[in-house]
Image (cartoon, rainbow, N blue to C red):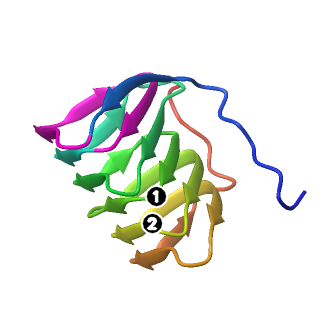
Amino acid sequence: MFGRKKRSTSRIETLIAAGTRIEGNLFVSGGVHLEGTVVGNVTAEQGAPAVLSIASKGLVEGCVDVPRVIVHGEVRGDIRAQDRVELGPTAKVSGDLSYGVIEMAAGAVIQGRLVSLAGTTASGA
């Protein structure tokens, strides 16, 4: 219902703090909270229940391929969230967004295409 927040079933295991800059690809298998910057792609390990949460000052300059993505900051690249993507009111995405389910707050900005993955099945899993 309205006003009711859903909690992630995956807990945050890794924090990339504000002021931290990672240059290179990041491979995740659990929950990651990003307050800093990643210059490179963020990819979940195959079959992992990974969650990427990007804080309001967090930035990814690259593609994101993680089952569940929560954005309050900025992504400069494509996002593929097979399960769910949540865009907060301060979210900015410059790239195409492929999603299983999408939740978008007023104020979020997408400069790219929205592509629904609903009805698609993962092959080889």
Q: Is residue 34 magenta?
A: yes
> Please, is residue 79 above or below residue 19 in the view?
below
What is the total number of numbered labels drawn onto the structure image? 2
> Please, is residue 6 above or below residue 61 in the view?
above
Q: On the image, numbered disc 1 is attached to which residue? A: 72
Asked if residue 81 lies left or right of residue 103, the reply is: left
Identity, as a three-letter code, of the amino acid under mark 1: His
Instruction: Give residue 86's position: percent from left, percent from top.
Output: 58, 56
For the N terminus, the quadrant is: bottom right
Instruction: Give residue 3's position: percent from left, percent from top.
Output: 82, 58
**For numbered disc 1, what is the local secondary structure?**
loop
Q: Are marks 1 and 2 in contact (CB under 8 Å)?
A: yes
Q: Which residues are magenta?
A: 18-35
Can see residue 45? no
Asked if residue 37 lies left or right of residue 70, the reply is: left
> 122 or 46: nearer the eye?
46
Instruction: Give residue 11's position: percent from left, percent from top.
Output: 56, 23
> Please, is residue 90 above or below residue 99 in the view?
below
Q: On the image, numbered disc 2 is attached to which residue? A: 91
> 89 or 24: nearer the eye?
89
Identity, as a three-letter code, of the amino acid under mark 2: Ala
Q: Quadrant of residue 95?
A: bottom left
Cα–Cα span, label 1 and label 2: 4 Å
Among the two numbered marks 1 and 2 on one chain, the one whose residue lies closer to the N terminus: 1
**For numbered disc 2, what is the local secondary structure?**
loop
For image coordinates 56% across by 38% down, the residue present is 122
Q: Is residue 89 magenta?
A: no
